[in-house]
Image (tube, rainbow, N blue to C red):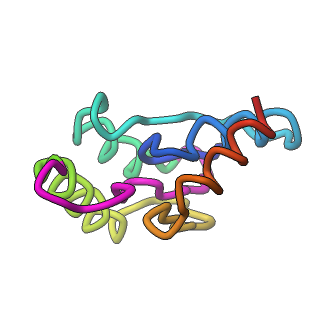
Amino acid sequence: MQIYLFGQGSLGKIIKRNLLLNSSFKVSLLPLRKTAIHEYVDLLLNNKQKKIIIDLMDPNSVNEDTDKSLISKAKVIRDKLSISKNLQHYIYISTASIYRSSLKKLMKTHY
């Protein structure tokens, strides 16, 4: 079983670190900004391996400075989830509602 973190977000490194320390699964982090769409699609179509996907692709907030191309890219990837092979679990986590002070506490606790 493999766990994939789609999008790094504010929590990606924290979640990856905790999963590596506390589970026997392989964990891969695929930052939305640095990973090509075809890599996500190839992973979704791979039927050799059971997988868990944790979706962290939402921006922390949406305003005029938000990279709209990343929002579009996340939508395309989510649309492709229906073709996924051997998907055991899909978990969606949005940090949009986590306030900065709470996030700082999380980061201090886990680093």
* Vertical arrangement, residue 30 with respect to residue 83, above or below: above
In this rendering, would 67 be left or right of 104?
left
* Residue 2 position by quadrant: top right
Where does the magenta region start and end?
48-66
Q: Decide which of 6, 9 is in the foreground and name it.
A: 9
Q: Is residue 64 one of those drawn in magenta?
A: yes
> If the image is split into quadrants, where does the C terminus sit?
top right
* Residue 98 position by quadrant: bottom right
Task: Name, please, the residue furthest toward the front.
Answer: 101
Measuring 29% from the left and 28% from the top, which residue is drawn there? 34
Q: Decide which of 98, 57 is in the foreground and name it.
A: 98
Measuring 23% from the left and 39% from the top, which residue is drawn there? 38
Indicate the position of residue 63 as horizontal and vertical percent values: 18, 60
* Vertical arrangement, residue 30 with respect to residue 45, above or below: above
Q: How many marks?
A: 0
Q: Is residue 73 one of those drawn in magenta?
A: no
Measuring 60% from the left and 35% from the top, which residue is drawn there? 13
Measuring 40% from the left and 61% from the top, which residue is drawn there? 84
In this rendering, would 97 be left or right of 22?
left
Indicate the position of residue 58 as horizontal and vertical percent values: 36, 59
Indicate the position of residue 89 as horizontal and vertical percent values: 61, 67
Indicate the position of residue 9 as horizontal and vertical percent values: 45, 45
In this rendering, would 101 be left or right of 105?
left
In this rendering, would 107 be left or right of 24?
left
The kind of secondary structure the magenta stretch mainly shows is loop
